[in-house]
Amino acid sequence: MKKTLYLKFLLAYGIFGIFGLVILATFVPSMTREHLIREKADSLYSEATLIANTYARNLYNSEISLEAVKDQLDALAVYLESSIQIINPSGRLILDTDTPIDVENEVIIEKFDSTIAGSSYYVIDDFFDFYPQDVLSVIAPITANYMVKGYVVIHTDMVSIDESLSSLLNISYITLIILFLLSLIILIFFTEIVYMPLRKITYATEQYATGNMHYEFSVDSEDEIGYLAACLSYMASEIARSEDDQKKFVANVSHDFRSPLTSIQGYLEAMLDGTIPPELHEKYLNIVLTETQRLTKLTNSLLTLNNLNTKGMLLDITDFDINQVIRSTAASFEGTCLKKSIAIELILTDEVMYVKADMSKIQQVLYNLIDNAIKFSHHNSVIKVETTEKKNKIFVSVKDTGIGIPKEDLKLIWDRFYKSDLSRGKDKKGTGLGLSITKEIIHSHNEHINVISTPGEGSEFIFSLPRSEENDEDD
Ligand code: ADP
């Protein structure tokens, strides 16, 4: 059988009940009996001492008659629910509240010994065979003129003590049962607060373990269990999301690889089987070359992205002049700009402006942004690359007056493989990976990149970099 937490708790609850009962049935009766006997013996002994020092002593001093003492003690015996005796040291019974005075027939208690109680002040036995059953007896000496004249003995039967004991025990049993029933509340609380939420969590964990990451559950409590459930649920949704992302990623990669490969294969087959005549070969080989270039670009971008993700971006941080990097990157686009009659205008803060960053990665960011700006700009336009300094940060902006980005696309352009519908016609070689690489690089520097764009008017991409202290040394 599966050992559930609930069963264990029930078992502990059962053990608690049984132990309580066993303790109540074994230790408690004997302890309570002893306590009751001692209490009774205490009060009887005080009474016996009192009688010994008053009536009994007066009796021995002949200050009071035997009948008068008997009357007094009879009344007291009824009140105490006991028998009171006055016994001579020899064992002769002088007075017994149970029997009338009979001077003719002397009653001698054989083997009477006043030290019967030993170190204690009471004894439980049949009092030298005087009683057929055990009684509780206390003995107090009667002294007069420094001599023991006799003893006051009070007996009480054990029935009354046993009755008190059983009624006390009954109260204890009832209390135990009430306690046991009350502790059921703990069981109910445990079930509601711990067991049921835990079962939900366990079931959900089983679902996640079998791969059902979309399983949804909730635990409505604000304690640690509720927090655990919320964390588990969040973890599963994150895993599900990343699984979905991965699937989308693979689908995108396959799609982007398949289309150039299909066209390469189609053109080559057509050239081989003569569908494309040899005089047109050069034209189609150029198309094939463009497609292979696109595949190379795609592969390189994927590799870059993969490195960025897996290495947690190992940056080679140095102090370098961002103005210089901007100038050289802009210069590398000279040929492309000439073809489209585009001018790149550089508006740089100072002659030199040092930043603290990974130079080659920032070069790549600039390359991606300027490349996009040129791709999406119209002929005969100007692209502005500007740097500004604000509170230890250098802001680099790449601004074009091209096609712009529709508002609904602004958030999506940073996603892998995203290409807006507008751009598809303009940029057939694009992979949709450039901006996601750019964003990863800037974020890994703990910096930010933003875009402001109006469709038909142009776009501006601005990213920040930490200013280097070298600037201050130069001043
Ligand atoms: P790609 O390599 O295809 O250019 P990017 O990730 O660099 O991929 O860009 C994603 C999309 O963002 C582009 O397809 C385009 O729709 C849009 N985009 C990026 N830069 C600009 C820009 N300067 N002007 C207009 N649209 C842009």
Image (cartoon, rainbow, N blue to C red):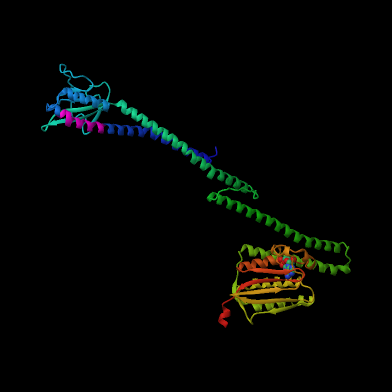
Q: Nearer the viewer, residue 140 or 404?
A: 140
Tell me: 26 left or right of 95. right
- Secondary structure mostly taken by the magenta-highlighted segment of the chain: helix
Q: Nearer the viewer, residue 450 or 167?
A: 167
The reply to whether residue 216 is in sight is: yes
List x then y, in percent, for residue 287. 81, 67
Corner quadrant of residue 155:
top left
- Quadrant position of ligand 1: bottom right
- The image shows residue 249, relative to residue 63, as above or below, that is below
The C terminus is located in which quarter?
bottom right
- The image shows residue 122, relative to residue 241, as above or below, that is above
List x then y, in percent, for residue 135. 26, 25
The reply to whether residue 111 is in sight is: no
Tell me: 48 left or right of 23. left
Q: Residue at x 42, y 33 (%)?
A: 174
Corner quadrant of residue 312:
bottom right
List x then y, in percent, for residue 177. 44, 34
Q: Nearer the viewer, residue 289 or 423?
A: 423
- The image shows residue 240, relative to residue 318, as above or below, that is above
Q: Residue at x 64, y 77 (%)?
A: 388
List x then y, in percent, for residue 285. 82, 68
Q: Which residues are magenta?
A: 41-57
Q: Which residue is farthest top?
A: 104
The N terminus is located in which quarter?
top right
Q: Is residue 197 magenta?
A: no
